[in-house]
Image (spheres, rainbow, N blue to C red):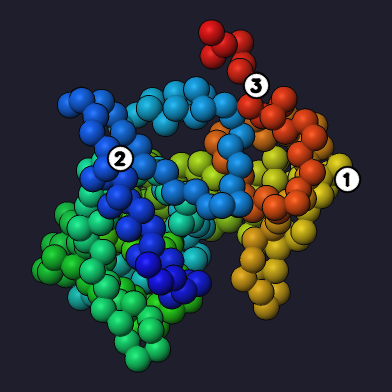
Amino acid sequence: VPTSYCNDLLSASVQLMKEALFSTAVPPGVMEKFILVSDTTLPLRPFSEVYSVLTEHDTSDFCIYPAWEWLQAKVNDTLLYAPWHHQWIVLNRPDAYALWNGWKPTWDEYDWPDFNISLHGASHTIAKRKHLLASEFDDGHPSWACADGLAPFGILYGALVPGGDGGQYYPGIGTLTLQEKSRNQGRCRTLVLWNTTSTQEHVKQFMVDDPGTDIVLPTWGDGGGDPAAFGGFSDDALRRLRASDYLFIRKVLPNATLSNYAKVALSESPKHAP
């Protein structure tokens, strides 16, 4: 499946979802999760713990960017929002199937995809339609929001209509709110450091400051498009990562020095030890 950075990484991801959906056969009632990770991703816990965390609930996980990065569309004098999210998502089987079935983009002359942002509940009542096109958000110029960070949530959960408190609740994800303009929202399973100003989380700030962590600072916001890359971690950084809510980290360089990585990150903790 051809891919193009930002324009379309999603078609390949959806193809992977399709293969996983139709190549597995599990007994009825068994919970399944479909996890998107990259080739530069490492787990931060042993498989038993990753499995335990992801099967604590049957809902999907999205890591939503701060609200100032969301797209918006004015429909019948009301603003509807399309939250932008990390591409590294975790989907349950119904959502994985719905994404595969719902990703049917059209293409403009610049090879930018257009696709449906679904409308449910309040947004459907306001627009009196079943969906808006992505191109209808942000004055018809959504090209700064990559399809893989806009379409999955948009197809599955649709446009957000903030309530009186500025938020909207989603089962399993929590309340997404316009009031949060500096931190990620939702459930973030993969740690990605996009810029050195997004270090409100202690573990991210520690790695930026840690002399024992080999980090190539991100170029995002400085004319480039890459997140931070890691060439190695101190033992203290690994312990902090292991203790965090993250299950994975990227982007780890192919030649990274990982001396004690397996010992710290992948050892069974007492509560999960056999």
Q: Quadrant of residue 270?
A: top right
Q: Quadrant of residue 120?
A: bottom left
* Label 2 Cα neighbours within 10 Å, binned few <14 / some 14-19 / many ≥20: some
The local secondary structure at tag 3 comes to loop
Relative to 69, is 255 above or below? above
Image quadrant containing the N terminus: bottom left
Looking at the image, residue 163 sits to the left or right of residue 237; the answer is left
Q: Earlier in the sequence, mark 1 or mark 2?
A: 2
Residue reaching furthest front?
A: 23
Distance from disc 1 to disc 2, alpha carbons, whole Å, reads 39 Å
- Pointer 3: what residue? 267
Relative to 239, is 95 above or below? below
- Pointer 1: what residue? 211
The local secondary structure at tag 2 comes to strand
- Pointer 2: what residue? 92
Relative to 136, is 24 above or below? above
* Label 3 Cα neighbours within 10 Å, binned few <14 / some 14-19 / many ≥20: some
Distance from disc 3 to disc 2, alpha carbons, whole Å, reads 27 Å
Specify whether residue 208 is in view: no
Residue type highlighted by circle 2: Asn
Q: Where is residue 105? Give x, y as percent.
A: 27, 73
